[in-house]
Image (cartoon, helix red, strand yellow):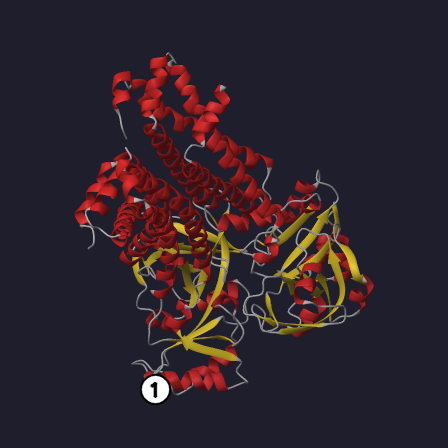
Amino acid sequence: MPLPLKYNFRNVRVRWRSTLSTILGIALVVSVFVLLRALARGIETTNSNTGDPRNILVVRKGSQAESGSMVSREQFRTLRYFDEVARNEQGEPVISAELVLIISVPRGTGVGEANTLIRGVTPSGQELRPQVKLVKGRWFRRGKREMIVSERLAGRFTGFEIGGTIKAGLDRLTVVGHFDARSSAFDNEAWMDADEARSIFDRDQYSSILLRPRDQAAADAIIKRIEVDKRLGLRAEHEVDYYSKQTMTAMPFKYLAAILGAAMSIGAVFAAMNTMYASVAARTREVGTLRVLGYSRRSIVFGFLIEGTLLAILGGLLGSILSLAVYAYVVVRKVQFGTMDWQSFAETVFQFRVTPDLMLTGIAFAAIIGLAGSFLPALRAARLPVISALKSL
Amino acid sequence: MTIGSFILKNALRNKRRAALSILSVAVSCALLVTLLTLQRELTIPPESEAASLRVIARNKVSLTQPLPAKQLAILDKIPGIVAVSPFSFFGGNFREETVTSFAQFAVDPARFQGLLVEGKIVEGSYDSFIKNRTSCFVGADTIKRYGLKIGDKMRFTGTFFPVNLDLEIAAVFQGTVDDRGVFFHHKLLDELMGDPGTVGTWYLRVASAEVANDVISRINKAFENTAAEVRAETERAFQMSFIRMLGNVKLLIGSISSVVVFTLLLVTVSTMSMAIRERFRELAVLKALGFRRRDLFGFILAESFGLAAIGAFIGIGGAWAMWTLSDLQKLTNGFLIYFEVTTRIIATGASIAALLGIISAILPSIAVSRMSVVEGLKTLD
């Protein structure tokens, strides 16, 4: 016969002071774990938000990212006339050769510089990325030293306000508009005319090619065709796949979450054990009574395990709420986080995200701490000899 | 029975609890020390005497924007520069690896020799590196890690450059801050790339630390208002700019550390309260015998301070031993190089633990001093 759950609930309340500090301790462990995972999640969401499922991105074989890729004008011409490529109303192929590079820009705080990704795009490039919308000012004009920057970056660097200028060698680029890319990776970029970028930064080659195939069959065909053609030396994949694979940047946060979670939970297990042992010791007579009443050793073990887990889950809940509060603060105050993208060396700005599944992971994590912490105390309670337990004060 | 043994007996009467408290303090202290060490490692790049004399000059536009090779003639004329070599990051992947953790650089071998101050040749000869255009000069750590020897071929697939390298190991160096790099002839890279007439960065050594700043401003000025303006900075400043880009590491680790300290406080306070509440009756007896509040506070303080001190000793000592004895450079694939637990970090950890021991004694002491003797004698729990 199992112990009634009510008994466990009430017991959690009795020794409230030590119980409360254990709950708080577990809550803090859980919130650190959830918040670090939220940072990693923010980066991942940015990448999984990026790209159009219909688009194909072409880079040089062997290069890991657009920024390190090179595509020649000749290769571009070849791809342009592939008949798998869709055509727009004017009969032009929907394909864009782009130049991706980084420039260092003074930070808005006035201390130091950071790298920003500049993308030289063609009119087709705009057409291929409908998620990028102008919110202020106007688009850059072709053949002019103008650029538009993401609204998110605008606040982080000096010279990114509308009318501001950025020095690039002897040339100056004027910011004429701000865009919003709906929290995608393009929100970390500044855009300008592709050929103008090639001339300013003295590049003979493009970095990548983005194209839209006619249909799904054409998409598969063109990926195959580029893969097989050894002379091209290029690699094609769906744009969304390319971005979802850029996971390196989130790695340090994931490692930190795992290592800290493990180390802090060991401390939390010890604290929970202490609380549960004290709880068992204080209730020796009660346990004896329960045994006399006919409760088996097993139900005593279960009773204490449930109690410890319950306590830890309360801690987990509190920790999740705590991380949610931090999240709310971040959202309300519009706090942004920046880190370096390991592939392009450019600064990535992201929003950190506390999602329900992260909170659930945190609570599950707390439950494991509770189970581990109450296991030995529960065994001890079950092993108490009935007669002497009844005699104890 | 002396007062000392009385306190000791009290602390150890519930051995399990004492052990658990000590262990939880130990784990938290170890974690705290590790976090502080990580923070130090990430915010202070490895610095040596020679590193402060080395300067990196890159294109002002950005690190990835190349510089014209003809700048060398102008650099050679700038006073205060002892040696200067082109220095181009190749960023290739070794063999079949998808992420290679050591860097490869194209240099001018004859000129590069003047930059190599701390490094000693341990195998092969530098001359054979200079003579053989397809050879390379490799750090001892990389040689050891892959089990390579002089004469072996190293194949790199370019990720930034659209070419691949096939290099023969000519010499091995050891004794620099980072003994992992691979250096090869810039001429080879130029040849493969069809002679673009560009280099990645310039790497140079200045005569002394005093003239470093002057030399840096001379370099910057020399190329002002040219098509390729230059940003020169010391190797240390260069590395710092990378770390700054990782984000606010200091704030992140700092806030995690404070959460760890707070959790630690909760645990020790609750343990001490538990230990004291159990003996309310005894403490009431002591009061009745004539011990003053001050004495009782002393007993409690000694016990809590003692537990915290032992925990801190185990935790900090453990962390120190672990990070000093393990080869982290190998474990983290070269991400962490020193990870030195400094005296300062040890002192910080120890003083936080000591403070915790004192704070944890205060709350239960207040409860004890408030209790009346009669009430205390009545408590059973």
Q: Is residue B194 visible?
A: no
Give whichever of A22, B221 is nearer the camera.
Answer: A22
Tag 1, which secondary structure?
helix
Packing grade of label 1 (10 A; few <14, some 14-19, many >=20) is few
Q: Can you give x and y, in whole percent of width and height, for residue B300 in the image?
A: 41, 24
Q: Can you give x and y, in whole percent of width and height, for residue A130 in the image?
A: 30, 68
Give whichever of A195, B376 is nearer the camera.
Answer: B376
Left-right relation of A357 to A118:
left
Chain letter of the residue carrying label 1: A
Q: Is residue B358 visible?
A: yes
Outermost residue on the top side: it is B290
Q: Quadrant of residue B317?
A: top right
Q: Can you give x and y, in whole percent of width and height, for residue B195 in the image?
A: 67, 71
Q: Is residue B318 above or below residue A86?
A: above
Q: Quadrant of residue A124?
A: bottom left
Q: Is residue B228 above or below residue A290?
A: below
Number of labelled discs? Answer: 1
Give whichever of B355, B128 is nearer the camera.
Answer: B355
Residue shown at 61%/54% (left/top)?
Answer: B329
Q: Which residue is mark 1?
A: A217
Quadrant position of the C terminus of chain B in the picture = top left
Task: Tell me the kind of residue under disc 1.
Answer: Ala
Q: Can you give x and y, in whole percent of width and height, for residue B88 in the image?
A: 64, 62
Left-right relation of A205 to B181:
left
